[in-house]
Amino acid sequence: MKKVFKLQDLECANCAAKMEQAIAKIDGVTFANVNFMTQKLTIEADESAMDDIVKQAAKICKKIEPDCRIVM
């Protein structure tokens, strides 16, 4: 399953790259992309694990850039 989320207050392209790398390492994620220009996060993963993966991704975003959040 592939889902696209809007990112709010993502202000650093380098941070976006770090987020993408960290999110891609979450168990169950087959593809992750953070597009700084469009402020979007794309995650492809098993549908049954998606809610947990999104929660983990939100924590990663907050850790790397404290003001950034995922809008669902």
Image: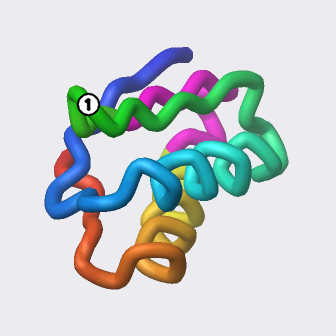
Rendering coords of residue 64 (x, y %):
51, 75
Q: Which residue is drawn at the image coordinates 21% and 40% (left, top)?
A: 6
Seen from the viewer's position, the closer of residues 33 and 28 is: 33
Label 1 CA crowd tier, 10 Å (few <14, some 14–19, many 20+): few
Is 48 drawn above or below residue 62 in the view shown? above
Rendering coords of residue 36 (x, y %):
34, 38
Q: Which residue is drawn at the image coordinates 76% and 51% (left, top)?
A: 26
Rendering coords of residue 61 (x, y %):
46, 66
Quadrant in which the N terminus appears: top right
Give the quarter of the image for residue 58.
Answer: bottom left
Seen from the viewer's position, the closer of residues 30 and 63 is: 63
Q: Is residue 8 magenta?
A: no
Q: Over which residues does the magenta segment extend?
A: 41-50
Is 7 drawn above or below residue 10 in the view shown? above
On the image, numbered disc 1 is attached to which residue? 37
Q: Which residue is drawn at the image coordinates 42% and 77% (left, top)?
A: 62
Rendering coords of residue 57 (x, y %):
53, 58
Q: Is residue 29 left or right of residue 40?
A: right
- Count all numbered tags in the image, as a single digit: 1
Q: Is residue 18 left or right of residue 4?
A: right
Give the quarter of the image for residue 20.
Answer: top right
Instruction: Identify the secondary structure beneath mark 1.
Output: loop
Give the quarter of the image for residue 70.
Answer: bottom left
Is 13 drawn above or below residue 47 in the view shown? below
Q: Is residue 42 magenta?
A: yes
Q: Which residue is drawn at the image coordinates 39% and 36% (left, top)?
A: 41
Q: Which amino acid type is shown beneath numbered disc 1?
A: Met
